[in-house]
Each structure stands twice: as C-alpha cells, then as structure tokens.
C-alpha cells in the first residue's frame, strides 16, 4: 500500500469532491452563501472503496464527512456560512473549518454573489498505527518515523474567494479559488504544504414542454490545481419536483468513475444517495455517499390582521 509520507514535503490532500456537488455548492464556493430565502443545512457522508482494509484488517479506505450551513442576512446585504469537513486517507486525517461571507446583488433576471472565506486546516498523522508492530511500514528504521515519539499534527491558515450567478429554476455558474495562499507547516517531520485549487461549476434546468412533470438537470464541476485537472459531469431527471435520479461520471483517477444517484424531497427535507460502481483494481464493494439537507424557510406569510370600529359594536 502506498502512503502519503516521505522525508520530503507532504502535499496535503486535495479539496473533497462529492457526487452530490450540485447540492453542496457551498463546500467549494463561498459566493453561494445566502442565495436562498432560507437557512440551509446540509450533511454528507462519503465512504469510498468500502471493504478495503490493510493487511491488519484496519479500515484505511478514504472517508469524508462534511456539514455546512448558510443563511441570508439582510443587514449585511448578503449571506454568511460555515463549512466543517473531515477527510481520512489511510493513517492521514485532515480537519478543516471555513467561515464565509457573500455579498449579493440582483443583476438582470438572476442574483450575483461575490464571496470569501477564512478558515483553518489541521493535518494529522496517526503515527502510532504506523509504528505498531506488524504495521504497514516498509522500513521500521525510517529516520522520519523513528524520531517521532507520538502522533503528529500541524495547523495552517486557509482562505478562498468566489463568484456565483444563479437564475432560480433555470441555471447557475460559479468560479472559485480555495487554499488561495499556499502555506507550509513548520519544517518538522510532518512538513506539508497547501496548494491552490480552482473550481468551475455550472448547471441547467430544463422542464420538458410536452410533459412539465419532468425536468432535466445536467451539471458539471471542474477542478484544477494548475498541475492537473479533474472533471465530473452529471445528468439527472427530476419528477414532479420531488424525486430525482441520474448518473455521474468523474475523471478523478482515485474514484470509481461511474456513479448512480437517487434522491427525493419531502417538504423542506432532501435526501440523496449515490453508489459508485467499482471498476478499479483496488478491490472493494464500491463507493457510497449519503446526502441530507434541510431548509428553514424564512419567507413567512404575514397573518391577516383584524380591524375594529366602535360604530359596528
């Protein structure tokens, strides 16, 4: 098994990507914050290569857990948001938190958001498991590992910007940059650095004129660190604005490229599931992802008032 570990700088894991990216745009673009008349809460659990273990039976397959919340704030002429994410790859974990703000303005028939975020990223290596007797260390005399007495972690500053334009019920487009200022951890045994990531996203909704119960929803997400580029394209069909299904294809080499997506909406609750069909030589039962979202509607209807006049007593 190859480990993200060497005596040279360790390159931090890339930004997490999901099959349900079209429902979690806040994760990669701060300009999405506050674009709804609601408090939006989403959570995702991504389990990749389920059943893939190391030689000792430890679960070392990639995992990603994320929760995000954002809401409009009229006083700030925009919206605010918070995204908390945890990545796990083998014995390496990365925890990140982003606090974001987006200025919003109606332009044409849509709404434009210009946003930024600040946050922290904490990288952590489970050295104890690596050094355990019978573990997956190729060289037990590795000078890097021998000098580490306990688990090792470093925290780095993070910042990003983005723009997002959306015409509700029709289309959206976004461009963002994360980990904007590459920084390195102290030159200790765990030294690693952040790399800039750029995201380009877009989606369209087309209601069939001959059968308005069906809506086609193609979308795409492209990510690059200027060294490599990855893309995910999806095509879904929504029925009666409540049930959807479709397929997604990704060029990300470490993913099972073809995924099937299913989901439904019950009032303000949305639930989605995707299954990545196993095609890699890793040997697993596939990739599973669960998405749950809830919206607290802020567009309340005013109750009708009453009027009394003493003339009608």
Image (spheres, grey):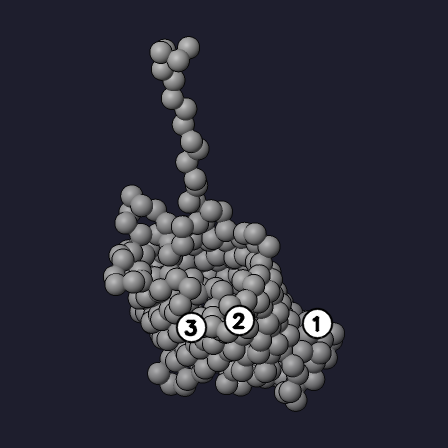
Q: Which residue is drawn at 42% across and 45% down?
A: 299
Mark before the other along the chain sequence, 1 or 2: 1
Q: Residue 313, how many percent across, how many down?
A: 42, 10
**Residue where numbered disc 3 is placed:** 204
Q: In the rendered view, does 279 fall on the left or right side of 309?
A: right
Q: Residue 90, how many percent across, how many down?
A: 60, 74
| Camera sees residue 16 | no
The residue lying toward the viewer, choosing from 5 and 261, is: 261
Q: Which of marks 1 and 3 is in front?
A: 3
| Camera sees residue 242 | yes
CA gap between label 1 and label 2 equals 51 Å
Residue occupying the far bottom of the picture: 281
CA gap between label 1 and label 3 equals 42 Å
Q: In the rendered view, does 100 fall on the left or right side of 41?
A: left
**Residue where numbered disc 2 is placed:** 211
Mark before the other along the chain sequence, 3 or 2: 3
Judged from the image, the secondary structure of the residue bearing numbered disc 1 is loop
Asked if marks 1 and 3 touch (Cβ < 8 Å), the reply is no
Q: Residue 240, how many percent across, how many down?
A: 56, 63
Mark before the other along the chain sequence, 1 or 3: 1
Q: Which residue is drawn at 34% across and 62% down?
A: 31
Q: Which residue is drawn at 32% across and 66% down?
A: 165
Judged from the image, the secondary structure of the residue bearing numbered disc 2 is loop
Q: Which residue is drawn at 64% across and 87% down?
A: 279
CA gap between label 3 and label 2 equals 17 Å
**Residue where numbered disc 1 is placed:** 58
């Amino acid at each position: 098994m190859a480990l993200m570990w060497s005596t040279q700088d360790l390159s931090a894991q890339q930004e997490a990507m999901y099959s349900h990216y079209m429902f979690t745009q806040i994760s990669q673009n701060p300009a999405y914050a506050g674009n709804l008349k609601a408090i939006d809460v989403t959570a995702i659990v991504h389990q990749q290569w389920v059943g893939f273990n190391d030689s000792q039976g430890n679960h070392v397959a990639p995992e990603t857990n994320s929760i995000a919340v954002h809401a409009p704030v009229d006083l700030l002429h925009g919206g605010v948001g918070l995204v908390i994410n945890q990545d796990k790859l083998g014995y390496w974990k990365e925890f990140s938190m982003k606090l974001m703000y987006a200025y919003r303005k109606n332009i044409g028939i849509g709404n434009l958001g210009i946003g930024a975020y600040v946050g922290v990223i904490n990288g952590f290596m489970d050295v104890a498991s690596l050094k355990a007797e019978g573990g997956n260390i190729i060289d037990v005399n590795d000078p890097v590992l021998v000098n580490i007495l306990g688990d090792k972690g470093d925290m780095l500053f993070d910042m990003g910007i983005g723009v997002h334009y959306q015409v509700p019920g029709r289309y959206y487009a976004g461009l963002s940059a994360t980990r904007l200022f590459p920084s390195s951890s102290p030159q200790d045994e765990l030294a690693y650095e952040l790399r800039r990531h750029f995201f380009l996203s877009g989606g369209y909704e087309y209601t069939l004129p001959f059968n308005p119960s069906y809506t086609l929803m193609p979308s795409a997400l492209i990510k690059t660190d200027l060294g490599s580029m990855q893309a995910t394209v999806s095509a879904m069909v929504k029925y009666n604005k409540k049930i959807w299904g479709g397929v997604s294809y990704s060029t990300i080499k470490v993913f099972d490229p073809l995924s099937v997506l299913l989901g439904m909406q019950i009032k303000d609750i949305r639930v989605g599931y995707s299954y990545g069909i196993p095609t890699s030589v890793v040997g697993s039962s596939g990739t599973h992802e669960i998405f749950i979202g809830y919206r607290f509607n802020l567009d309340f209807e005013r109750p009708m008032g009453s009027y009394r006049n003493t003339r009608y007593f």
